[in-house]
Image (tube, helix red, strand yellow):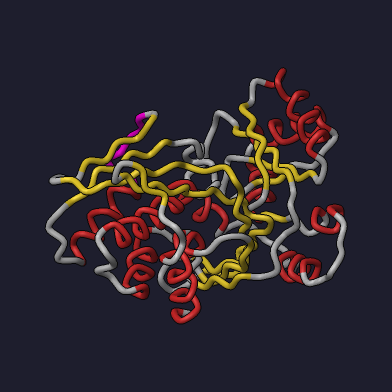
Amino acid sequence: MFLYFMNILQKFAQQPEKVYNNIMKQNAYAKINLTLEIVGKRPDGFHNIESIFQEILLCDEIEIEKNNTLDIKFIPSIDTKKNTVHTSSELFFEKTIVKERAKMRIKKKIPIKSGLGGGSSDAATTLLLLNKLFSYPLKNDEIIKIGETIGSDVPFFFLNGTALVEGKGERVHQINPVKKLYVLLAIPSFSFSTKNSYSQINGFKLNTTNSTKKLISILEKKKYDLSEIENCLHNDFEKMYLNIDENFTSTLRNLEQKTSKKFHLTGSGSALFALFDNISEAQQAQTKLKTTGIKTILTETR
């Protein structure tokens, strides 16, 4: 797997730099989980998953330049005490002999605690940008190892597009990409703790659906309809919340009643999404949700 990731990271390194007045810029894209199946608990306390991650165009924007001190600012400001950008930056400088530091500005567009992978994407992008900014003091496999210590979803964000993610998130394999689809995100006001959700799911009986394998088979076909993808969408956390959380259940049902469209959870939540192959239909659905008070974002697959 390292060899595969090394090729991907090398491809990133060769991309034209976005540099303006010595400021390097890069987008950190979000993701949705088209499937998420919990297939067992590991001896280390984590859980094994089988999941299809899909990158979307919603992104944070990271700007970085050399500086005498490490200066990190989020726009708009967020609680930065345990932020992944700080963690990845500190680990980068611990592992290198670089004496300079960096000034970073992160324009935050991905909602936090939403299951959209914003923190993990920021971490991966930060590591890649720092390595490029300081002329590659770390080898690709070293960057990957750092990323794995920061979060289970970070390895995916060294890639792009559509991928099968297994283990606790460290085994990532690029698969046939999903065709261009429009993604309507609904961001509820409540959130879930990923740690607590995994703890709760230990006592929740899950039925094997093989949704991940079914979706991979669909994507391997030359032609397929959106309905075929929708029939494979599945999230074990969604099934659990529908059984234990009335607030989540009423929110999901309200979205579906207003739009006549099926919504699904991404990650451990709380963001929900619906897929469209027609932008006008996606816009109409978004308009119908204005009366609910739930924040919506219309984006597309990448």
Question: Which residue is more in the foreground, 272 or 65?
Answer: 65
User: Which span is picked out in magenta?
Assistant: 77-83
Viewer-nearest residue: 24 or 213: 24
Above or below, comparing residue 61 to residue 297 in the picture: below
Q: Point out residue 111 in the picture as x, y percentages from the top left corner.
A: 51, 37
Q: Position of residue 128 (x, y in %)?
A: 37, 60
Q: Residue at x 41, y 36 (%)?
A: 107
Residue ID at (79%, 34%): 256
In the rendered structure, does residue 163 fall within the stretch colored magenta? Answer: no
Vertical placement of residue 40 versus 87, above or below: below
Residue 211 quadrant: bottom right
**Rendering coords of residue 286 (x, y %):** 73, 29
* Viewer-proximal residue among 71 and 119: 71
Q: Position of residue 90 (x, y in %)?
A: 23, 55
Prevalent SS, magenta region: loop
Q: At 81% from the left edge and 67% from the top edge, which residue is drawn?
A: 218
In this rendered view, identify the residue nearer to me: 271 or 156.
156
